[in-house]
Image (cartoon, rainbow, N blue to C red):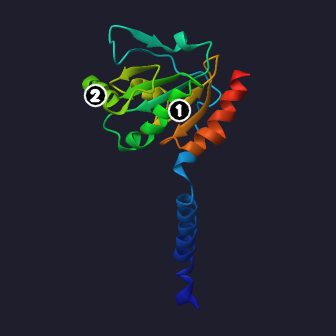
Amino acid sequence: MMKHARYLVPMGILLVLLYFLRAGLSLNPKEVPSPLIGKPAPAFSLPRLDQPAQRISRDELRGQVWMLNVWASWCVACRQEHPLLVQYAKQSKVPIYGLNYKDERAAGMKWLADFGNPYTASISDRDGRVGIDFGVYGVPETFVIDREGIIRYKQIGPLTPEVLRDTIEPLLKQLNS
């Protein structure tokens, strides 16, 4: 009986670890809640991608509901999302601002020329500091920001028609009413 007792503690620890591993693997990383939801969007003032002498700041965007889409020319998932953004922008339901994240200006400009420009304006975050302030995990990510500059929604990963239809559209209607 004593021979087998010494294996009970390690076996118990192993079972507990396996339980937590299984629970962790069942989580969806796209459903990570952002601590910024319900808080003011971080302050920024960045140069426009197309006209670097001009800057856009968070405060200039107050008074309107808007989306911020974080993207980069080197981002494979952004290529998947981009046609949907171009199509959605044509509906003019909300101004979409791009945050070109850790990218070269020329590469970002070429990307927009090649694949279309869905953005009201795109701003350049070459060093990624503003992306960090927004809590960006990776690109693409999209934020919905209300008239007072409060972040109301964060999408981690590419937008889908379902996310636009089932989550963002109802939120936009609510925020614009």
In percent of width and height, residue 87 lies at: 49, 34
Occupied quadrant, residue 70 = top left
- Residue, disc 1: 88
- Disc 2 on helix, strand or loop? helix
Q: Can residue 69 be seen in this view?
A: yes
Nearer to me, 33 or 152: 152
Q: Label 2, on which residue?
A: 110
Residue furthest to the bottom in view is 1
Tell me the kind of residue under disc 2. Answer: Lys
Residue at image position (55%, 30%) is 143
Q: Which mark is residue 167?
A: none
Q: Tell me the quarter of the image containing the C terminus.
A: top right
How many residues crowd around disc 1 within 10 Å: few (fewer than 14), some, or many (20 or more)?
some
Inspect this view and state whether residue 33 appears.
Answer: no
Spot occupied by residue 169 in the image (x, y as percentages of width and height): 65, 34
Secondary structure state at the residue bearing disc 1:
helix
Quadrant including the N terminus:
bottom right
The disc, 1 or 2, on the residue closer to the chain's N-terminal end is 1
Q: Position of residue 8 (x, y in %)?
A: 57, 79
Q: Dot 2: within a 10 Å radius of its alpha carbon, few (fewer than 14), some, or many (20 or more) residues?
A: few
Q: Distance between the residues labelled 1 and 2?
A: 21 Å
Residue under the image location 36 percent in, 21 percent down:
124
